[in-house]
Image (cartoon, rainbow, N blue to C red):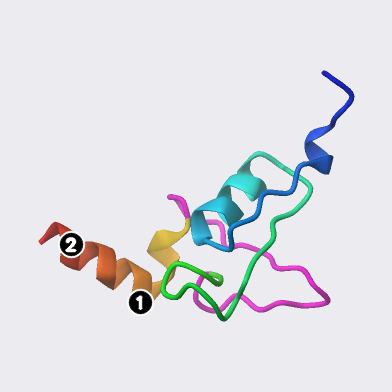
Amino acid sequence: EHGWSAGRCIPHGGHQMALNIAAGLRLGGNESYPDLFQPFGGFPDGVEVVEGHVSLPDLPGIGFEAKTDLYAELRALSD
């Protein structure tokens, strides 16, 4: 609309929610830190980086549910 396309927007922060927002809004990418900010950082269980790209599983939610360690932490907070 103002000279920028969604494909040029690349959020950063390295956390799981930003990755899923970028995928859901079809943004240009997402800066991620796979080994930092655990258990929030990284990718869902079983997802591998291949040539700088990841494919996210087709699951409901914002990605927390597919990270066993993070999901356990969040569940413990709600108990």
User: In the image, is residue 51 above or below residue 62?
Assistant: below
Label 2 CA crowd tier, 10 Å (few <14, some 14–19, many 20+): few
Left or right of residue 67: residue 56: right
Q: Residue at x 41, y 73 (%)?
A: 39
Residue drawn at 48 percent across, 72 percent down? 37
What whole-number distance in Å separates the C-alpha atoms at marks 1 and 2? 13 Å
Quarter of the picture holding the N terminus: top right
Q: Which residue is mark 2?
A: 77
Q: Secondary structure at mark 2?
A: helix
Identify which residue, 36 or 55, lies in the foreground: 36
> Where in the figure is residue 24, as x and y percent of width and height?
62, 43
Residue 65 is covered by the magenta coloring: no
Question: Which quadrant holds residue 70?
Answer: bottom left
Residue range (magenta): 44-62
Lateral position of residue 5 relative to residue 44, left or right: right
Q: Which quadrant: the C terminus?
A: bottom left
- Residue 56 inside the magenta-drawn segment: yes
Q: Quadrant of residue 72?
A: bottom left
At label 1, the amino acid type is Asp
Is most of the magenta stretch helix, strand or loop? loop
Amino acid carrying label 2: it is: Leu
Taking the view exactly as shown, the residue that stands out farthest to the left is 79
* Residue 35 at x, y percent in the picture: 57, 81
What number is the disc on residue 69?
1
Residue 7, image x, y percentages:
82, 41
Q: Which residue occupies 84% across, 19% down? A: 2
